[in-house]
Image: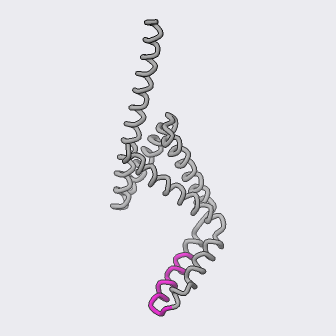
């Protein structure tokens, strides 16, 4: 199912992003250096872009100040677990589908809670996306199980007739 593969690909990109950002949060000064170098680039030498560069530096400094080791650990573990389940489902392993559907169900519950309590349209969009992806993954898992059972029963029947 192409739609499932595309959705899993988007989730994999998100998971990689989480792992990278989480790793960068372990070394907040490196993140600050990246933003600082970006802001000092030639494209920010123009007067109009100076305000944007200052705002970016200010927000990066706040993000670095408020980042914690706990958030970094969460992002790295969360992204890694997502990648493991996505790769299992991609290779059509039963444990990958089960893990992916379970994880997505938890995400949907979390996202719906935040959509309701914070009136966030974006979280509602994520909940719908994750819900559809979970339904597609469950469908593929069930389809794979049905084919496995049909193949097994065919083999057993063929042996009995011989």
Up/down of 147 relative to 115, above or below:
above
Q: In the rendering, at what x and y percent does residue 11 appear?
A: 46, 53
Tell me which corner region of the image, top left, top right, bottom left or bottom right, holds residue 30.
bottom right
Q: Residue furthest bottom?
A: 47
Up/down of 58 relative to 2, above or below:
below
> What residue sits 47% from the left and 38% below the top?
97
Up/down of 105 relative to 76, above or below:
above
Question: Would you say residue 49 sits in the magenta stretch?
Answer: yes
Taking depth in this image into account, of 99 and 61 the one nearest to the observer is 99
Taking depth in this image into account, of 154 and 12 the one nearest to the observer is 154
> What residue sits 52% from the left and 41% below the top?
88
Magenta-drawn segment: 46-61
Q: Quadrant of the N terminus?
A: top left
Question: Would you say residue 29 sits in the magenta stretch?
Answer: no
Taking depth in this image into account, of 160 and 7 the one nearest to the observer is 160
Q: Main secondary structure of the magenta part?
A: helix
> What residue sits 59% from the left and 52% below the top?
77
Q: In the rendering, at what x and y percent does residue 76 appear?
A: 59, 55
Colour mapping used in the image: one colour
């Amino acid at each position: 199912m192409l739609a499932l593969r595309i959705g899993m690909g988007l989730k994999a990109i998100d998971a990689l992003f989480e792992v990278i950002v989480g790793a960068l949060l372990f070394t907040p000064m490196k993140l600050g250096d990246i933003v600082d170098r970006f802001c000092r680039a030639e494209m920010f030498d123009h007067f109009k872009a100076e305000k944007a560069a200052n705002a970016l530096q200010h927000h990066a400094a706040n993000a670095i100040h408020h980042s914690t080791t706990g958030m970094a650990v969460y992002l790295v573990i969360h992204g890694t677990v997502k990648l493991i389940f996505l790769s299992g489902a991609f290779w059509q392993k039963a444990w990958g589908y089960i893990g992916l559907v379970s994880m997505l169900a938890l995400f949907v519950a979390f996202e719906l809670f935040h959509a309701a309590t914070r009136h966030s349209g974006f979280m509602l969009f994520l909940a719908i996306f994750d819900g559809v992806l979970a339904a597609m993954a469950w469908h593929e898992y069930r389809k794979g199980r049905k084919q496995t059972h049909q193949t097994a029963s065919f083999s057993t029947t063929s042996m009995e007739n011989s």
